[in-house]
Image: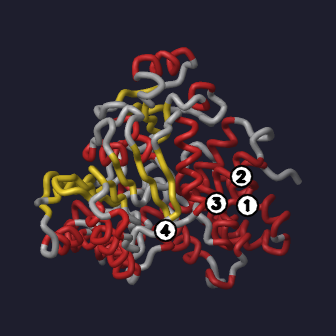
Amino acid sequence: MKVDLAREVALKILFEMDSKNAYSNVILDEYLERYEEKLKDKDVNLISEIVYGVTTWKLTIDVILSKYSKIKLNKISTWIKNIVRMGIYQIVFLDKIPKSAAVNEAVNLTKKYGFKSTGFVNAILRRVEKQDYEELKQIPNIQERFSKMYAFPLWLVNKLIKEYGQKEAEEIMQVSNERPKLTLRVNTIKTNQKDLLLKLQEQQIDYEESNLKDFIFVKKIKSLSHLEWFQNGECTVQDEGAGKIAQVLAPKPNQVVLDACSAPGGKTTYLAQFMQNKGKIVAWDMYEHRVKLVEENAKRLGITIIETKVKDATKKEECYHETFDKILLDVPCLGLGVLKRKPDIKWQRKEEDISSITKIQFDILNTCSHYLKKQGELVYSTCSILKEENQDIIQKFLKQKNFKILYEELIQPSKTTDGFYICKLLKCE
């Protein structure tokens, strides 16, 4: 009995996510690096497909699993549950893998990770068909149908329908389940878009130019880390929506800028590009390991104007009073705009989290507004799409402070970009 390595690695990742409540993108990167020498390109693609697929569609998969299992979900071991989930995902959602292969590989994994359950796994997967998903479309209750069809928790389905209406909410759920595009941002401190495109062509990497300046969509790259021009910091990975936030703030050379919630440093380093690496950016984050990510990003990209500090942006310090020309507040949020990149957020967030996260968001905005010079500009942003985290925070703030809105935009998740909210404020005299 030989176990398929790609599926075994995928299983280990899913087990760690469940047992340690770890983020999919972090654990996936760790395992791909650990097994790099043993994995072929097709293995990496299959691992990513299964991990993100099972995580994205977990609720729907569990509905189908429960249909055929006499044992309740919480009574099935984590190893076996994830083996069955992997099998269901391949059978229902993937067209290129024969059902026989999905079943046989699941049984092989079960022999290694739960020998006594081979009959259980085999019996369930042989009964599963694509039709099981089609039947969910017939559920009469809209909220329940959307929840099971798009694998969204019911509280979030209700929230999206309330804010956006049935049609728009469904579109958001659909697009949030799609795999994201890989987007590169050109590091204009070291190169330009034309030269980077030439390097992509030389290495036969498929790409598509973005409508947003400095951004390129690329396809079919196993890993960026081994590419010399990536190692040299000629580009970095960043979504268009995140890039738009920095573009809206648009600091100038020799200004003094604060990025109060900076890790891992994508927006921070893009701000430095606008400043042509001249002036000063003060970058804060609450945790030392996250501050180090900003420092590593800046070093690779050749940026020298970023000064990092471990600091809680909700805690006011008078020494920073009216110090900064511009401030970026990309505040902690529920992350509902980036579900296609971090699908596990759907299962980790709860409705009751809204009140605690919005308090932090307002406190950061309220505190850091004191650090902005008069006539200075501040951008408040989130990678979330709920009014409570966005427009409601701004309106509450404007009732208390002498600021005015210069620019406001809600970017909904789409095929090309994540979801973001951006609001640029001017501090009046």
| Kind of residue at disc 2 | Tyr
For marks 3 and 4, the one nearer the N-term is 4
Residue at x 62%, y 46% (from the top left corner): 97
Say which residue label 3 marks.
Answer: 86
Residue 76 % position (x, y): 69, 79
Q: Is residue 377 above or below residue 356?
A: above
Q: CA distance from mark 4 to mark 2?
A: 26 Å
Q: CA distance from mark 1 to mark 2?
A: 9 Å
Whether residue 142 can be seen here: no
Say which residue label 2 marks.
Answer: 31
Q: CA distance from mark 1 to mark 4?
A: 21 Å
Say which residue label 1 marks.
Answer: 12
For marks 1 and 4, the one nearer the N-term is 1
* Contact between labelled residues 2 and 1, with CB atoms less than 8 Å apart: yes
Horizontal side, residue 174 vs residue 22: left or right = left
Residue at x 41%, y 47% (from the top left corner): 281
Q: Is residue 206 above or below residue 382?
A: above
For marks 1 and 3, the one nearer the N-term is 1
| Kind of residue at disc 4 | Thr
| Circle 4 SS class | helix
Say which residue label 4 marks.
Answer: 60
| Circle 2 SS class | helix
* Contact between labelled residues 3 and 2, with CB atoms less than 8 Å apart: no
| Kind of residue at disc 1 | Lys
Q: Quarter holding the N terminus?
A: bottom right
Q: Is residue 395 above or below residue 384?
A: below
Label 4: few (<14), some or many (≥20) within 10 Å? many
Q: CA distance from mark 3 to mark 4?
A: 12 Å
Front tag of 1 and 4: 1
* Contact between labelled residues 3 and 1, with CB atoms less than 8 Å apart: no
Residue 169 % position (x, y): 27, 64
Front tag of 4 and 2: 2
